[in-house]
Image (cartoon, grey):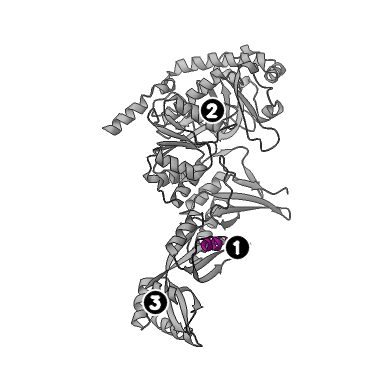
Amino acid sequence: MIAELETSMTDCNEVSAPDYRPLDELRALQLERLRQIVTRSYQNVPLFRQRMVERGLTPDVIRTLDDIARLPFTVKADLRDNYPFGLFASPMSEVVRLHASSGTTGKPIVVAYTQEDIATWTSVVGRALAGCGLHRGDVIQVSYGYGLFTGGLGAHYGAEGIGATVVPTSGGHADRQIMLMKDFGVTALCCTPSYFIHLIERAAEMGIDMKELPIRAGVFGAEPWTDEMRRHIEQGANIEAFDIYGLSEIIGPGVGCECRRHTGLHIFEDHFYPEIIDPETGEVLPEGAEGELVLTTLSKQAMPMIRYRTRDITCILPGRCGCGRTMRRIGRIGRRSDDMLILRGVNVFPSQIETALLQVEGALPHYQIVLTRSQGLDQMEVQVEVTPNMFNDRMGALQTVHARLQAALDRVLGIRVRVALVEAHSIERSEGKAKRVIDRRNQ
Amino acid sequence: MKIKQLSIFVENKPGHLAAPIRLLAAEGVDLRALFLADAREYGVLRMIVSDCERALERLTSQGFVARLADVLAIKVTDHPGGLAGVLAALDATGIDIDYMYAFPCRNADQAVLLFSFADVEAAIARLQAAGINPIASDELLKL
């Protein structure tokens, strides 16, 4: 009875109301907002206006939603080239917040929010969390980094917005994260999936079984993760794991999120309009076809993005989700069009390596790919941290594990790569996104 | 009768052997016997220590991958033919040895042989039937 009551409470969470908007109303709202955002960008963003003029277009080209395909794309390089404020559509006096990417190469990417944008962001993250069954009374620990990265503050505002109790731990200090989870009775945690796996491991080392803690849900995003990783997390911590999607250029976390059906991620498309394109030709692909996700912000004031190419490879799932939401769903993102490695002519995605490693019992996904070049030939080494499960005092047993990892990788990749067993914690862990690939080929 | 042996995974790189040893030294853990088995890029450090439970807990809490395993200790007189005699008896029982190592005792004309068997219970039974009694942990640590 209590379980039923909880289900009905979460399903009826009032913040989720926009998720169920009738389709005809939703399409009408999207069209109206698309017209406004195109007009706003045309009037305020010189780059967009110039591209429209070059194509002989004006904002009134938008008569139906399908006309979006006639608009020019925006790419990441546009944000870099117009650093810092070149793509803003609002005067600085209306901008209340700036975020920026870490900027591993050269200048970072800057994004801006008006007061209204912050309210939109809060509401979409709130809808995402509500879809995960979280509500007032939940204690949500936000272990995404707070600061220039959008993860921490985005999740924080959304969680507060639904009336949950927020524990803003930010990233790092795993021991303290675990202590607070236990002492504060944390019921849900937001962080990257790789960081949560680190927390499970660390808790075990501290003699704490994560399965015994009150935490029942994890909302994980900011990096691609596999279904195997999900099973590993769910079993290791006895929680329900949700995939949340977002990117700073669009708003941050909260562009889309899984509901409790776990059949794809609902895009909050009253604010973010999704398209799937062929990454080579730019042609819009039909529902169900895999391609690059392109997003248009329908309501963002400070920095609208028209047809932003995310580089994330997915598809729009056909049909309606069993949960009743009208928001369309995308498939989980397994790879990005730019994280593909080409090794001796063979395409390799880090997610394939993850799948292979996880097939071998006892292998946690703490690994790193190191690319080198020797006598003109590319070499790949996959370093895998030895776990207590894999370790054995008998050298033969250890070598058997090593051989099984090697065989699983050979099978999945179809090319020979080197597997190295390394000590636990020897691969550097970033607080946010795991750095999976070290490329030393051009050194 | 079974002895707990502490095993630690170490990479075959400069400084990697010293790190766990330093930690055990800081804890005041006495190392009674030590053997390093090595593959090309990594090795297994096997040790008999004074307080294996505490050593394991400290190592694990510091992120080392370590475990305890059961081995058997057999005392022999430390003179030519001591080991050969035991091995002959073992051969006669047909027990498979996974690995072994040995150390001399401090004050006596004796040495201790440490054996890892695939099936430790069966090994105990067959050794005893052959008149060989593996020694207990407290006796081992006194030697």
Which one is nearer the viewer's eye here, B9 or A376? B9
Circle 3 SS class: loop
Badge 3 sits on which subunit?
A: B
How busy is the neighbourhood of tag 3: few (under 14 within 10 Å), some, or many (20 plus)? some
The answer to whether residue B129 is magenta is no
Residue A305 has which mark? Answer: none
Task: Give the answer, above or below, for where B38 lies relative to A29.
Answer: below
Q: Amino acid at mark 1?
A: Asn
Q: Nearer the viewer, residue A86 or B57?
A: B57
User: Gap in Å between the C-alphas at discs 1 and 2?
Assistant: 54 Å
Which amino acid lies under the numbered mark 2 shown in the image of this protein?
Pro
Q: Do we see residue B108 in this rendering?
A: yes
Report if residue B26 lies within the magenta region: yes
Q: Residue furthest left?
A: A1
Please say if A422 is above or below A193: below
Nearer to us: label 1 or label 2: 1
Q: CA distance from mark 2 to mark 3?
A: 75 Å
Judging by the rendered image, the residue that carries numbered circle 3 is B135
Residue, disc 1 = B12
- Choose between A319 and B95: the one closer to the eye: B95
Q: Which residue is mark 2?
A: A286
Residues shaded magenta: B11-28
The x, y position of residue B116, in whole percent, is: 44, 72
Q: Is residue A395 left or right of residue A85?
A: left
Residue at the image position 63 percent from the left and 62 percent from the top: B14
